[in-house]
Image (tube, helix red, strand yellow):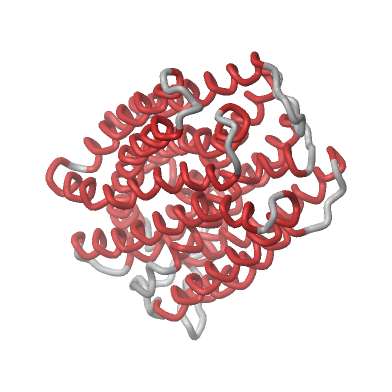
Amino acid sequence: MGYALGAFGTGVFATVPTVLLLYFCTESLKMAPALAATVVLLPKLWALVWDPAVGLWSDRAQTAIGRRRPFLLAGSIGVPLTFFALFAWPYPQGNAAFVGVALLYFLLTNAYSLFAVPFISIPAEISEDAAERERVGAWRIGCAMIGTLIGAGLAPMLVRAGGSGRDGYVFMAIWVSLICCAGMFAAFFATPSATGTRTAQALSLRQAISILLAERPFRRLAAAYVLQLTGVGIVSALTPYWIIQVAGRTEDSVGTALGIMLSVTILSTPVWAWVVRHMGARWVISVAALFFGVATLGFLAVPPAPVLPSLLLYALIGFPFAGLQVGPFALVAHLTHAAGEARGNRAGLFTGVWTASEKLGLALGPGVAGLGLAVVGFQAGAPVQSQEALWGLTVLLAAAPSLFVWASLPFVRK
């Protein structure tokens, strides 16, 4: 449990930028949607290099407190500080804010990697018993879902409670940073210093790439997960626009909708975990992907004005979303354990690639959303949008997640 509390931090800091950063850039800073999409996407592309590098670094680290724990400590300090700065910095208005937001988000994603990559490595090497690895992973996923609930549900409410606008985002950043800092430090103190059996030898870039290319099941799972998280990220990023612009409600309603979605996700996680044990992770991933795509198409049928139908739709989306978390993480723990041990105790390398894939998917979602908003004619900061733009927003929210999530199914089949 102490280890799993660190997932509050990974859950929140992976979710809040996905849900609010695009909206913060376009509506609070008045940045053009295409430029805001670039802000969200660029740092995560760098993570494709940085995260595996952190994994290799932690694989061969030798310190008095273990291989992984120095990285947990550095991330526990760096992530809350850079997260607060991201939303509290006195940016100029308009496109001039691009450089400042991009730089701080770049620093946040790098600090996040220092914590998340070693943190996710731990279940794969904590035990030779597959059931114990699944149990440790289940605790982590449960806390990560609660962290995601805080990030997607509570954060918009805190913005509203802080007075909305720039002041509201500062208020939110203070409280979220404090909550998650506590959870991340709990993981640092609870994680044993001795994880894994050996310290890995240094690898060249060519050797690391060769190892990754040899593990086809891992690569296929990572590709599927990127596509699935892109679909999930589109829903999260476009929800504030749909709730406020189309449904005509306030920021706290964004928190309510996403909070209901993620509450259902948390409650249904044990159900999907049971199905994984009896039917297998691959079956769970496929079924959950199919259901998720069907559920998001409901935005084309649900009238936005009545509150109850839209909240029920978000609850319906939350159920398969749990399967898209439980299935991949159950499977990746086993693949990482087997591949990491077979390749000379390289769990950090594989989890580095996995967290980079996770970041890429969560960045591609808002990136696609921002570019889609530009295509449908959405005007940043405008008090009233055209009917064509609002209809295009609804179609984008309904269809784009389905396309990405369903595109992952061929990768899961084998």
Residue 207 appears in the picture as rendered: no
Farthest residue toward the left? 278
In the displayed structure, does residue 253 sit left or right of residue 1? Answer: right
Q: Position of residue 184 (x, y in %)?
A: 50, 70
Does residue 30 sit above or below 265 in this rendering? above
Does residue 111 sit above or below 256 in this rendering? below
Q: Position of residue 316 (x, y in %)?
A: 33, 35
Farthest residue toward the bottom? 64
In the displayed structure, does residue 351 sit left or right of residue 175? Answer: left
Does residue 403 sit above or below 285 in this rendering? above
Task: Name the residue at 43% across, 32% down.
Answer: 310
Q: Position of residue 221 (x, y in %)?
A: 36, 39
Q: Is the C terminus in the top left, top right, bottom left or bottom right quadrant? A: top left
Q: Position of residue 48 (x, y in %)?
A: 57, 45
Asked whether 219 or 9 is in front, the reply is 9
| The quarter of the displayed image where residue 284 is located | top left
Task: Name the residue at 47% across, 32% down.
Answer: 231
Task: Name the residue at 71% across, 60% down.
Answer: 170
Residue 45 appears in the picture as rendered: yes
Asked whether 32 or 301 is in front, the reply is 301
Q: Is the N terminus in the top left, top right, bottom left or bottom right quadrant? A: bottom left
Task: Name the residue at 48% across, 83% down.
Answer: 65
In the displayed structure, does residue 233 sit left or right of residue 2? Answer: right
Farthest residue toward the front? 306
